[in-house]
Amino acid sequence: MGRTESSEMVAPGASTMPGVASHRIDALLAPSYLEGLTSIPIEEVRSRRAECQSVEVSFSYLRRLVQGRLDIVLSELRRRQEGGSADLHSLVDQLPEILSEHVHAPGNGRLPQWMAPGEPDIDDSLVGRVDAVADADVLGRLPDLSDDDIQALIDRLTELERDISGQRRALHERIDALQEELVRRYKTGEASVDTLLK
């Protein structure tokens, strides 16, 4: 299903992340999520920490996906500015180098604690959010897009990366708070080492 119009590629009103299912991420990021933390059962504290970590892994993967596509579009912009040939084949040849720029992505330096080899289990709505901005069809037509379309695509991907990064930071805050509560209970004797390590 091709996109031939700029208005289709950069449809307005799509700046809000739908979430790992929107109700799930909304619940995790709600101000009330950490209320009464010191009084809830330790099993619930541990369960919330695991859920936040799982969602953070999805957002970490998604952020790298957006950054990779943004790098591809920025490479096309540089090619135009430098007067290179409009050759899709040459762009494809550059993809390994382009995408390797974010092997060590900027950020707070922490690695997801539950990251495993291969793709994490991500809700289709998340990847669909990225595809709605720059799917394989759009990336394959980059040399044919106008300069305005290229800039609009860069703006959309930049905004999306900013949204994802903001939500990741909020998830990190919750993971830290939950971890600190587990440590507090251990230090005060409210929970034994055996309980915390289950």
Image (cartoon, helix red, strand yellow):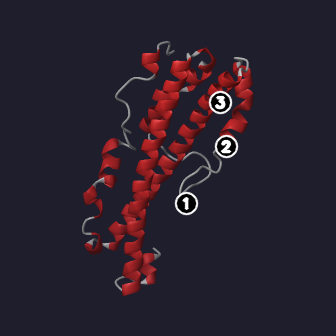
Q: Identity of the amino acid at label 3?
A: Ser
- What residue is disc 3 on? 75
Left or right: where 38 falls relative to 191: left
Q: Residues within 10 Å of mark 1 (few under 14, many from 20)?
A: few
Measured Cα–Cα span from mark 1 to mark 3 = 27 Å
Sequence order check, earlier mark of 2 and 1: 2
- What residue is disc 1 on? 110
Residue at 57% from the left image edge and 59% from the top image edge: 109
Residue 131 in sight from this viewpoint: no
Left or right: where 120 falls relative to 15: right
Q: Residue 57 in the image: state x and y as whole percent.
A: 50, 52
Residue 4 in sight from this viewpoint: yes
Badge 3 marks a residue whose secondary structure is helix
Measured Cα–Cα span from mark 2 to mark 1 = 18 Å
Residue at 40% from the left image edge and 23% from the top image edge: 11
- What residue is disc 2 on? 101
Left or right: where 83 falls relative to 1: right
Nearest the viewer among 39 and 170 is: 170
Asked where in the image residue 119 lies, by quadrant, the reply is top right
Q: Identity of the amino acid at label 2?
A: Glu
Asked where in the image residue 38 lies, by quadrant, the reply is bottom left
Nearest the viewer among 196 and 163 is: 163
